[in-house]
Image (cartoon, rainbow, N blue to C red):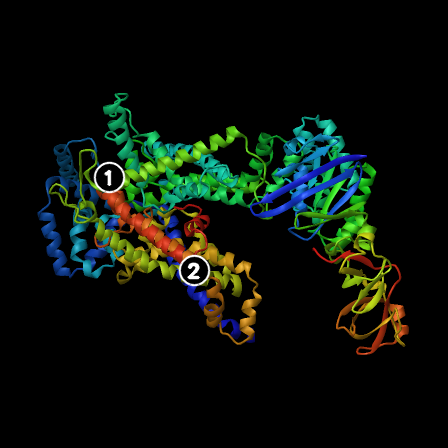
């Protein structure tokens, strides 16, 4: 009893957090899964007739008489023939003519003959059923609108469309039965596998080189390698087109026009090469962070032990270093694979000729509102990676190489390896500089390589050569900032509060809460995006609660999709401190709130800042979830960048990207200056493990 | 016969002199302990011996051949790390057999050698376990077996027992010494634990601030320290500043204390007399030369001995250890006046300056 009272505030707080996490994470994700099994199918005629009859009954008898009489009178001949066939079917009879192959004239004649052939009894039955058949087959829509106020939205839809929801695996099997989806699925798998391997190899080379102090200017390499992590979407794809496209500065400008080596119309990056290039460069940070984390924490004494046992440099690397890094390598492969499976930005901008599953999902969702198929495709995107992950967890003995954080080994790296590692790292860095340079350059010219005169128009009113785009960079950047600024502090506080409750108060069900908070980290952004559309279009059937089309759905999505960073950071901090601190405060008379505010929050200030910063950066750069949630009333800069890049308006896309990059860097520099405790983005990154 | 020679070894890390002109000869089959506080350079010296850290100056000779330019994988040394540094991805047997595997020895030869070592280090039955599945003491044995597997010319151990609890530490210490004696392998052992060093080594080398201060048999290190730091670091000492009176006596606070003054210090203006607590004897009764009075300031009972603190009339505090059975017969209490004297021939006279 006393115990219960003591923990009452904690349990209330947990309950509130639990409800929030359920509504804004678990519910949308669950609904996506549910939605993916939904099928829309036509309602059989007899049931549809029953539904129509019930609707007709809602009319005044007189009005009903008049209405049906008018409907029958105004039928077109072919409608009349179909209604006769319907009425015969409703009587339980066989339609005695060929309804598919015969011409209308033949059918009409056959129908007349059939009606004439009825017995008196049959004729009476037919006359009674005919008006209903007419209404059911031809006038349901008119009827539905007539009765709109008397029907529930679901009844209205059902009557109007004559279809209803069923459940089945059709959307899942479509990946195998539809040639279009099958090809996209294969492309996705191939692209993701290739990019995962290349990215992990390069990420490993850079991380290894930096940790073994082999690479020149390691801090610079590290920062530049991480830049894509905080970049707005499709920057690299856009930049790649500017440099290597049909009219690219390198392909056309240098190689074709200046050197005469190639024909840029045929030799350019569109297609597999370009998509792979953009995806690899964009995802190196994710791989690098994972492997850097593993390599920097491994005990260098282990490699020294191998060397003192007589192993050569190559033997040490292949027999000791690689096996020890293996868990990190596998994690990097799976993460990058999954990120590529679900990314539609770069493939849509650069590789429209290579359809991928994510691209089709985007089209289905935005172009056809086919939410059910989109949901099933979203599931298909995570299934392969999850299968591999589960298989590895099950098959291999769970290997956890918890070793004391040690200094790197003092073993010399052979000269050839040094040169190769430097070459890889500096190629990546140079390419990164080149690509971002191209973005900056393109943002200041009217039309890239067509009219290279200087302009600030893309940054201001967008007026270039008399043409004004509907959306302007400053407007949407400002809208993005508003969303990010609203989401960041709440996201940060929610995250550390959750960490505190789970780590210190340890309420019943805390583990489940933690799992729900981590869901967005595991699941791709598209799932949460689609989930928000499904869940909050008409929440619990109440129209006034609808969030779609507002700014708030963006704020909520960005907040809840990214609180896991602050949560993880908060737990990590709390695990380092003795829980007795909290108990000491409690025994000195501090309430739950006082303990949290005066004792825990100061300890967790870093985690709070980190969590809020991550939410903020994501608010500015995220594309995959929010693209389904923006509306004509409220758009975001990242969506503008994607749309402009896809539409070939590179100047606008570039200028908006530069805006976003400047804001992100400025905020990070400010926090860095405030904290002076190492590069903030490296820590953001270490926890983010590179989600896009 | 000298097997390992370190000649004028120097190593700086930035402005820090980690090893400062150290020379040392180690005989074949000898067990040498490098003893010192953390940061004194002992581990750096060991890593120079192993080849992990190249010295800035000086040379390392093994069997008369210079080896200091050789990489670690061509040194033929067995190294046991403080963190064990076992290969986490390999089983116990694979860990021990690693050195043979990289030398492309046959599987049967490797298996035989691994079995021998498991026998020697009492690891039988654990061959197929992974490092994280065995205890700290067992991991330590694996590290030792791995270091010995290739029959190295030298065994180097870097604080191998510091991560273990006291009881296992004492047990493994004896075992390591027994194994080393059986194999007759030249061994260098780094530790900051003086008890460990004194009990395990043939010779103990005391280091401070990168310098090798004294290398001697354990008994001599304790009984005959040659520097103030050694006297202070190894065991407890009363270090009393004084002036030599003649070859047999030193004047401390106006009283003569019997101590053999080495010829080099007889003319010195001031010296330090090192008196171990067990060499101070207490008594009641009248004070007469060479005894002196004092007041009992503190008493700590520690089982077999009683630690007491006496304040002399000059205000100097002396620590003395009295066997518990003698203490009972003395019958003195806190605040009582006692007389004390120093056991004949026990004090050591040291130069006053320096560390």
Residue A207 picture location, percent across and down: 48, 40
Identify the residue at image location x=70%, y=33%: B97
Report crowding for label 1: few under 14, some 14 to 19, many 20 or more residues within 10 A (C-alpha): many
- Up the image or down, A577 lies above or below A174; here it is below
- Up the image or down, B321 lies above or below A50; here it is below
Residue tagged 2: A608
Quadrant hosting residue B268: bottom right
Residue situated in front as seen by the camera: A642 or B295:
B295
Residue situated in front as seen by the camera: A102 or B171:
B171
Instruction: Using the image, name the chain to which the residue with label 1 belongs.
Output: A
Residue tagged 1: A442
Whole-number angstrom distance, CA of label 2 to CA of label 1 = 37 Å
Residue situated in front as seen by the camera: B331 or A104:
B331
Residue situated in front as seen by the camera: A133 or A507:
A507
Identify the residue at image location x=23%, y=56%: A54
Give the left or right position of residue A516, taking residue A534 as reference. right
Give the left or right position of residue A624, taking residue B300 as reference. left
């Amino acid at each position: 009893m006393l115990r219960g009272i003591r923990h009452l505030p904690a349990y209330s707080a947990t309950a509130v957090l639990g409800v929030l996490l359920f509504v804004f994470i678990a519910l949308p994700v669950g609904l996506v899964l549910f939605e993916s099994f939904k099928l829309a199918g036509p309602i059989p005629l007899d049931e549809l007739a029953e539904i129509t009859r019930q609707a007709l009954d809602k009319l005044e008898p007189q009005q009903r008489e008049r209405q049906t009489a008018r409907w029958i009178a105004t039928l077109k001949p072919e409608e009349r023939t179909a209604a006769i066939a319907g009425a015969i079917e409703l009587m339980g009879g066989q339609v005695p003519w060929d309804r598919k192959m015969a011409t209308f004239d033949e059918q009409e004649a056959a129908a007349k003959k059939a009606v004439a052939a009825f017995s008196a009894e049959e004729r009476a039955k037919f006359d009674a059923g005919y008006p209903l058949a007419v209404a059911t087959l031809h006038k349901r829509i008119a009827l539905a609108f007539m009765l709109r106020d008397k029907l529930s939205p679901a009844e209205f839809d059902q009557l109007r469309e004559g279809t209803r929801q069923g459940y089945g695996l059709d959307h899942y099997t479509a990946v195998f039965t539809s040639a279009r989806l099958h090809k996209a699925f294969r492309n996705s798998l191939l692209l993701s596998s290739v990019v995962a391997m290349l990215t992990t190899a390069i990420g490993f080379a850079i991380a290894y080189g930096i940790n073994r102090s082999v690479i020149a200017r390691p801090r610079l390499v590290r920062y530049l390698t991480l830049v894509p992590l905080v970049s707005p979407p499709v920057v690299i794809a856009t930049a790649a087109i500017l440099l290597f496209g049909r009219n690219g500065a390198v392909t056309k400008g240098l190689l074709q026009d200046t050197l005469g080596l190639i024909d840029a119309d045929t030799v350019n990056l569109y297609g597999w090469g370009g998509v792979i290039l953009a995806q690899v460069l964009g995802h190196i940070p994710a791989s690098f962070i994972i492997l850097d984390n593993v390599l920097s924490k491994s005990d260098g004494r282990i490699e020294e032990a191998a060397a003192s046992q007589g192993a050569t440099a190559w033997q040490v690397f292949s027999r000791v270093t690689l096996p020890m890094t293996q868990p990190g390598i596998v994690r990097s492969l799976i993460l990058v694979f999954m990120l590529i499976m679900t990314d539609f930005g770069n493939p849509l901008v650069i590789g429209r000729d290579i359809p991928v599953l994510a691209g089709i999902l985007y089209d289905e969702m935005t172009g056809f509102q086919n939410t059910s198929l989109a949901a099933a495709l979203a599931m298909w995107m995570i299934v392969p990676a999850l299968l591999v992950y589960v298989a590895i967890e099950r098959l291999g003995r769970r290997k956890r190489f918890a070793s004391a954080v040690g200094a790197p080994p003092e073993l010399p790296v052979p000269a050839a390896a040094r040169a190769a590692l430097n070459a890889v790292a500096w190629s990546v860095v140079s390419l990164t500089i080149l690509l971002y340079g191209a973005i900056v350059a393109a943002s200041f010219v009217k039309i890239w390589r067509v009219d290279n005169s200087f302009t600030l128009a893309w940054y201001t009113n967008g007026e270039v050569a008399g043409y004004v785009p509907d959306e302007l960079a400053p407007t949407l950047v400002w809208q993005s900032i508003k969303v990010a600024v609203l989401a960041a502090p709440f996201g940060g506080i929610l995250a550390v509060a959750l960490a505190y409750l789970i780590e210190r108060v340890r309420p019943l069900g805390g583990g489940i809460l933690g799992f729900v908070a981590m869901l967005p980290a595991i699941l791709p952004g598209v799932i949460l995006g689609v989930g928000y559309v499904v869940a909050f279009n008409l929440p619990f059937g109440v129209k006034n609660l609808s969030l779609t089309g507002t700014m708030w759905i963006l704020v909520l999505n960005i907040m809840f999709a990214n609180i896991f960073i602050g949560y993880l950071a908060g737990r990590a901090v709390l695990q380092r401190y003795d829980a007795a601190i909290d108990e000491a405060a409690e025994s000195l008379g501090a309430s739950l709130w006082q303990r949290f505010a005066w004792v825990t929050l100061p300890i967790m200030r870093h985690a709070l800042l980190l969590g809020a910063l991550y939410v903020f950066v994501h608010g500015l750069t995220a594309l995959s979830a929010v693209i389904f949630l923006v509306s004509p009333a409220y758009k975001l800069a990242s969506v503008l960048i994607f749309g402009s890049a896809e539409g070939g308006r590179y100047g606008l896309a570039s200028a908006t990207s530069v805006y976003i990059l400047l804001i992100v860097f400025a905020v990070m520099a400010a926090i860095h200056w405030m904290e002076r405790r190492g590069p903030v983005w490296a820590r953001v990154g270490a926890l983010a493990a590179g989600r896009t | 016969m000298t097997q390992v020679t370190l000649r004028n070894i120097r190593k700086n890390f930035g402005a820090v002199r980690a090893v400062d002109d150290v020379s040392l000869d180690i005989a074949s089959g000898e067990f040498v302990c490098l003893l010192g506080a953390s940061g004194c350079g002992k581990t750096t010296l060991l890593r120079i011996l192993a080849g992990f850290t190249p010295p800035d100056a000086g040379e390392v000779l093994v069997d008369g051949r210079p080896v200091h330019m050789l990489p670690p994988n061509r040194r033929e040394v067995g190294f046991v790390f403080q963190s064990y540094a076992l290969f986490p991805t390999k089983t116990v047997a694979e860990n021990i057999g690693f050195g043979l595997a990289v030398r492309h020895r046959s599987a049967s030869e490797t298996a035989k050698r691994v079995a021998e070592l498991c026998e020697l280090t009492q690891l039988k039955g654990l061959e197929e376990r992974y490092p994280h599945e065995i205890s700290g003491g067992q991991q330590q044995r694996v590290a030792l077996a791995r270091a010995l597997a290739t029959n190295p010319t030298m065994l180097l151990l870097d604080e191998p027992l510091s991560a273990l609890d006291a009881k296992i530490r004492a047990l493994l210490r004896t075992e390591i010494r027994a194994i080393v004696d059986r194999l007759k392998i030249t061994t260098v052992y780094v530790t900051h634990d003086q008890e460990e060093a004194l009990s395990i080594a043939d010779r103990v080398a005391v280091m401070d601030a990168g310098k090798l201060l004294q290398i001697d048999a354990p008994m001599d290190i304790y009984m005959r320290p040659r520097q103030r730091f050694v006297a202070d670091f190894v065991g407890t000492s009363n270090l009393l500043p004084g002036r030599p009176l003649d070859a047999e006596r030193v004047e401390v606070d106006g009283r003569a204390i019997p101590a053999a003054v080495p010829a080099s210090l007889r003319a010195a203006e001031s010296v330090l007399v090192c008196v171990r607590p067990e060499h101070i004897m207490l008594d009641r009764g009248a004070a007469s030369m060479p005894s002196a009075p004092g007041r009992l300031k503190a008493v700590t009972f520690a089982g077999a001995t009683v630690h007491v603190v006496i304040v002399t009339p000059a205000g100097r505090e002396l620590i003395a250890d009295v066997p518990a059975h003698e203490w009972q017969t003395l019958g003195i209490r806190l605040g009582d006046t006692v007389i004390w004297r120093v056991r004949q021939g026990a004090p050591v006279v040291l130069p006053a300056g320096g560390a």
